[in-house]
Image: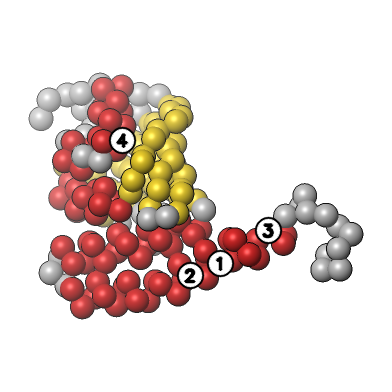
Amino acid sequence: MAVMSVDSTTAAWRAAGESGDAEAAAACLADTVEAISPLTAAFRFSGRDQVREMLIAAMEVFEDLRYHTEVGDERTRALFLTGRAGREQFEEAQLLRFDADGRIVELTLFGRPLPALTQVMGSIGPLLVRRQGRPGLARLIRVASAPLALFTRVGERRLVPLADPNRGRGSADG
């Protein structure tokens, strides 16, 4: 595997994300890469093959990815992007750590807001397990995550605005 500069790896990673090309994104990864999900602490995706599968599922769910900020150095970069999962807009932060060959060896993901994260969970999880040959578990994950997605979506639109510190204080409810 050829040595890449961190700048060229990062540029290739960004281009792959914005074009929805999971294979091009996987080409930026070290063989021993580890991806840390924003959705679960129960496991990590380990190795290029597992992370590639996660990227394929993500690229099926995400739309309109646009990177807007990048900070870091020759060992670590933080990238920030916006996108959409279904009808939910989201913002994601990606912490990338690089090996001596300029490949991504660790990918830690952070996302917001909560309704978008629950949409992603209900979409990516079933895709991943279906690709593993477990369609029953895929249906179960989709069904189990649907109420959580609904509650977070309704809460974000109806309840959270009631706690807005800029909301008027003279009303009967506050």
Q: Quadrant of the N terminus?
A: top left
Which residue occupies 31% across, 22% down? 7
At label 1, which amino acid type do we have? Answer: Val
Q: Residue beneath label 2, please?
A: 150
Mark sitting earlier along the chain (4/1): 4
Labels 3 & 1 near each other (Cβ < 8 A): no
Labels 3 & 2 near each other (Cβ < 8 A): no
Whole-Å distance between the Cαs marked 3 and 2?
17 Å
| Position of residue 67 in the picture relative to residue 46 (left or right) | right
Whole-Å distance between the Cαs marked 4 and 3?
32 Å
Task: Please tell me whether residue 130 is drawn above or below residue 32 in the rendered image.
Answer: below
Say few, some or many: other residues with alpha carbon within 10 Å of mark 2 (under 14 / 14 to 19 / 20 or more).
some
State the image coordinates of residue 150 (x, y, percent, origin top left).
Answer: 48, 70
At label 3, which amino acid type do we have? Answer: Pro
Q: Secondary structure at mark 1?
A: helix
Say few, some or many: other residues with alpha carbon within 10 Å of mark 4 (under 14 / 14 to 19 / 20 or more).
some
Q: Residue beneath label 4, please?
A: 18
Q: Residue beneath label 1, please?
A: 154
Whole-Å distance between the Cαs marked 4 and 1?
29 Å
